[in-house]
Image (cartoon, rainbow, N blue to C red):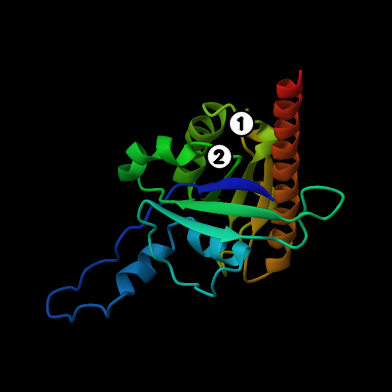
């Protein structure tokens, strides 16, 4: 069975909510995360949804990496319907984990960069993520997917997002799990199929080189 490793990466900017003022009681446990959650990219929640690993919708910063193993009945590796196994590596976006990134990148077949389109700082960081995880790993642009994740109620204008070269060559999709969850699910299936095609072609070339 064909196996593919996909990295889920992107910026993370969790900022704790304001502390209690003089004479005020502290916020309930988890309130700080809720305040900060408005600023992160939503990568982990999206990963859970796309892999159907859980129904968790709360935000908890990923510490280092979290590996989700899954199969998708709509994605096969050949005309005979052979299945595929995927490993989705949900990588923490905090810069303090940067020293771990080279190990995470090893043998990756695809990279999904998730960002919050409502945050200018996330847009500025996109080229760094692309350079580090795609270009430096010699992956093809077809093996990379950009996801502009929109928070519930954000009311973002999808048409207003334009990216500079070389990012404008990449496939960009929008996700909003509240308004249209099936749209991103279908786009992700298309992306998985392209990754499987790339892995299959690479494997065929290796087999041919051995035979010759």
Rendering coords of residue 141 (x, y %): 66, 33
Q: Is residue 93 left or right of residue 150?
A: left
Whether residue 118 is visible here, answered yes or no, is: no
Q: Earlier in the sequence, mark 1 or mark 2?
A: 2
- Answer few, some or many: residues within 10 Å of disc 2's Cα (few below 14, many 20 plus, some between 14 and 19): some
Q: Is residue 41 above or below residue 104?
A: below
Q: Is residue 11 left or right of residue 114?
A: left
Outermost residue, top direction? 212
> Quarter-wise, where is residue 169 in the image?
top right
Q: Is residue 36 left or right of residue 112?
A: left
Residue of label 2 = 108
Looking at the rendered image, the disc whose residue lies closer to the viewer, 1 or 2, is 2
Image marks 1 and 2: residues in contact by CB distance under 8 Å: yes
Residue of label 1 = 139
Please give the name of the residue rendered at 52% of the width and 42% of the height, measured from the top-left corner.
123
Rendering coords of residue 82 (x, y %): 78, 54
Q: In what element is the residue under mark 1?
A: loop
> Quarter-wise, where is residue 55 in the image?
bottom right
Q: Nearer the viewer, residue 179 or 138?
A: 138
Outermost residue, left direction? 23
Q: Nearer the viewer, residue 19 or 77?
A: 77
Whether residue 80 is visible here, answered yes or no, is: yes
How far, Cα to Cα, is label 1 from label 2?
9 Å
Q: Is residue 154 left or right of residue 168?
A: left
Rendered image: mark on residue 212: none
Please give the name of the residue rendered at 44% of the width and 44% of the height, measured from the top-left corner.
121
């Amino acid at each position: 069975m064909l196996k593919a490793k996909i990295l889920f990466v992107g910026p993370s900017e969790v900022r704790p909510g304001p502390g209690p003022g003089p004479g005020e009681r502290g916020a309930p446990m988890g309130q700080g995360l809720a305040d900060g959650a408005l600023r992160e990219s939503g990568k982990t929640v999206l990963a859970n949804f796309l892999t159907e690993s859980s129904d968790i919708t709360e935000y908890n910063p990923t510490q280092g990496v979290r590996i989700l193993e899954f199969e998708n009945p709509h994605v096969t590796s050949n005309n005979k319907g052979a299945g595929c196994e995927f490993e989705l590596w949900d990588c923490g976006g905090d810069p303090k984990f940067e020293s771990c990134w080279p190990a995470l990148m090893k043998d990756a077949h695809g990279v999904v960069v998730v960002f919050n389109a409502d945050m200018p700082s996330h847009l500025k960081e996109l080229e760094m993520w692309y350079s580090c995880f795609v270009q430096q790993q010699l992956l093809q642009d077809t093996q990379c997917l950009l996801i502009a994740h929109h928070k519930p109620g954000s009311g973002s204008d999808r048409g207003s997002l334009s990216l500079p070269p070389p990012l404008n060559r990449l496939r960009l999709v929008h996700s909003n799990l509240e308004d249209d969850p099936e749209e991103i699910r279908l786009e992700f299936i298309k992306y998985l199929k392209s990754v499987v095609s790339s892995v299959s072609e690479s494997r065929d070339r290796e087999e041919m080189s051995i035979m010759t």
